[in-house]
Image (spheres, rainbow, N blue to C red):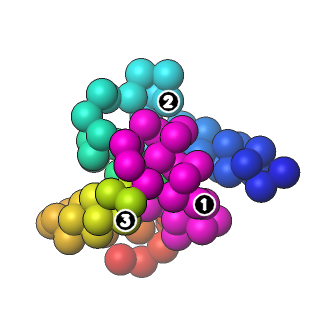
Amino acid sequence: ERAETWSIQLRHFAERAGIRLSNLPKQKSAPEKMLLAAAMKNSLDASNTWLAQRLKTGSIRALPVCLQRWKNKPGNAEALAGLLNVEA
């Protein structure tokens, strides 16, 4: 049930961000993947295991590290806030 909710929300975020889930970049830490993962963690606290498998980000242990690096890059916090419709 949670996985179904996560899938629906992931599709919603991908659509809003103009990202095609069927055509994600191969790079494990691609910005598109990190944006979607960050949005999912912020909105629904989706599990690292589910995100790593669904977005093909590699190791579940590496995902939080990649997300933190992504969030620290200029402009990414604002991109995430825009996707979530909140103030940065």
Could you say which quadrant of the image residue 10 lies in?
top right
Residue shown at the point (46%, 27%) measured from the top left: 20
Residue 76 appearing in the image = no
Residue shown at the point (15%, 66%) measured from the top left: 74
For the record, the magenta segment spans 38-60
Earlier residue among tags 2 and 3: 2
48 and 83: which is toward the camera: 48
- Residue highlighted by disc 1: 46
Tag 1 secondary structure: loop
Earlier residue among tags 2 and 1: 2
* Category of crowding for the residue at label 1, using alpha-carbon neighbours closer than 10 angstroms: few (below 14), some (14–19), many (at least 20): many
The residue under label 1 is which amino acid type?
A: Ala
Q: CA distance from mark 2 to mark 1?
A: 17 Å
6 and 53: which is toward the camera: 53
- Residue highlighted by disc 2: 21
Q: CA distance from mark 2 to mark 3?
A: 20 Å
Question: Residue 5 colored magenta?
Answer: no
Image coords of residue 3 (percent x, y): 73, 48
